[in-house]
Amino acid sequence: MNEQPNGESNMKTIPTAIQRFEYCPGNGTRYDLLFGLTGDKNMLLVWLYNEGAGGFAFQCSAERDGTLLHHSYLSEKMGVKNLADIAALLAFLAQYGVRVGMPQDFNDDGLYAPRPILVVGGEE
């Protein structure tokens, strides 16, 4: 996700003002999100899950210097317990250069991709 074959970065820049996004990561859910920088240079993510009227919010320093945002921390702070939703929100943030720690069995796109529990007659 960080680099295209021609060497150019496809990393998005965090909006300098709060903007509204409809994020559809491919897990069957459309996420109505508010995202951007606040006046004090914090990063704000709000998931408006209740028909756009209310939801969960998360704010942290936008100057993370590569600090990992772990799925359990985001889950705790936002109050979102569903790992599929947390993985999708982390995938959204990763597009903006936030270093994220996905839940086990979720890929970098935030989609459920369990590893096989048994491999017979070949290599994994």
Image (cartoon, rainbow, N blue to C red):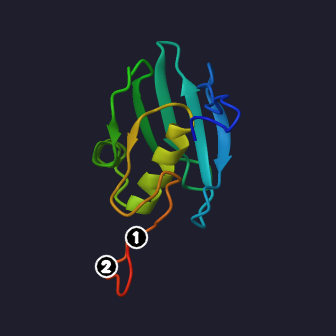
> Would residue 55 be seen by someone viewing this image from the given angle?
no
> Would residue 19 be seen by someone viewing this image from the given angle?
yes
Q: Position of residue 74 (x, y in %)?
A: 35, 43
For marks 2 and 1, give the CA distance.
9 Å
Residue positioned 66% across, 37% down in the render: 4
Q: Position of residue 78 (x, y in %)?
A: 37, 45
Amino acid type indicated by mark 2: Ile
Amino acid type indicated by mark 1: Pro
Other residues around mark 2 within 10 Å, as few (<14) / some (14–19) / many (≥20): few
Residue positioned 51% across, 47% down in the render: 91
| Residue at the extreme front of the image, as rendered | 122
SS for callout 1: loop
Vertical comparison of 39 with 25: above or below: above
Q: Dividing the picture into quarters, in which one does residue 14 lie?
A: top right
Disc on res. 50? none
Vertical comparison of 16 with 70: above or below: above
Left or right, 36 with respect to 84, comes to right
Residue 113 vs residue 121, the one in the foreground: 121
Residue 53 vs residue 39, the one in the foreground: 39
Q: Dividing the picture into quarters, in which one does residue 17 lie?
A: top right
| Residue at the extreme bottom of the image, as rendered | 120
* Residue at the disc numbered 1: 114
Q: Which of the two marks, 2 or 1, is nearer to us in this view?
A: 2
Quadrant where the image shows the C terminus: bottom left
Q: Position of residue 1 (x, y in %)?
A: 58, 41
* Residue at the disc numbered 2: 117
Q: Are marks 2 and 1 in contact (CB under 8 Å)?
A: yes
Residue 61 vs residue 39, the one in the foreground: 61
Vertical comparison of 93 with 41: above or below: below
Q: Position of residue 16 (x, y in %)?
A: 62, 19
Residue positioned 39% across, 81% down in the render: 122
